[in-house]
Image: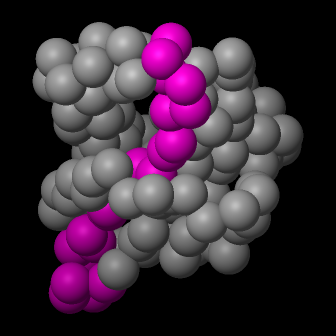
Amino acid sequence: MERLPYIDEHSTIVPADRAGTWSALLRTTCENPNDLSTLPRGFTLDAADPPNRLAAVGHHPFSRYALTFTLTEETPTRTRLTAETRAVFPGLHGRLYRALVIGSGGHRLVVRAMLRRVAAAVRTPV
């Protein structure tokens, strides 16, 4: 997929090493953590570099989008988990959709909640 325009980026510090954070990320984002093709509806795997990066892409009539998680070691027991969103919203319907999703702040709330779920999954491993 082409390089999409930057939308935003959110980060959190996860109290685990990169391997533990990667495992928690997969448990919270994939239906089957052993199969990266089981990402949530609307997303397909674009690239994976365990335990450093997971990139997913998707599209629907009003947008094309990419969500990339990057895991960076802060200390041996703390990992910075960053979610970067890129998207394009073509046409009038796309502009309206962008206003609803991005302009309303809803996207920001969903991404931050996703990051909190990953951090919580580290604390309560399966």
Q: Nearer the viewer, residue 114 or 117?
A: 114
Residue sitting at 52 percent across and 42 percent down?
88
* Residue range of the region highlighted in magenta in the rendering: 73-94
Residue sitting at 40 percent across and 23 percent down?
95
Magenta span includes 82? yes
Q: Is residue 25 left or right of residue 46?
A: left
Q: Is residue 109 left or right of residue 32?
A: left
Tell me if residue 23 can be seen. Answer: no
Residue sitting at 16 percent across and 17 percent down?
104
Q: Nearer the viewer, residue 31 or 89?
A: 89
Pinpoint residue 34: horizontal percent, then vertical percent: 79, 45
Pinpoint residue 43: horizontal percent, then vertical percent: 69, 33
**Total number of numbered labels?**
0
Magenta span includes 43? no
Q: How is the image coloured?
A: one colour
**Is residue 47 positioned above or below 25 on the image?**
below
Q: Nearer the viewer, residue 89 or 46?
A: 89
Q: Residue furthest front?
A: 92
Q: Is residue 93 left or right of residue 41?
A: left
Pinpoint residue 100: horizontal percent, then vertical percent: 29, 12
Give the prevailing secondary structure in the magenta stretch. Answer: strand
**Is residue 15 positioned above or below 120 on the image?**
below
**Is residue 16 positioned above or below 46 on the image?**
below
The quadrant of the picture occupied by the N terminus is bottom right
Pinpoint residue 74: horizontal percent, then vertical percent: 21, 84
Q: Quadrant of residue 80?
A: bottom left
Tell me if residue 52 can be seen. Answer: yes
Residue sitting at 50 percent across and 32 percent down?
89
Q: Is residue 91 left or right of residue 56?
A: left
Q: Quadrant of residue 70?
A: bottom left
**Is residue 39 positioned above or below 24 on the image?**
above
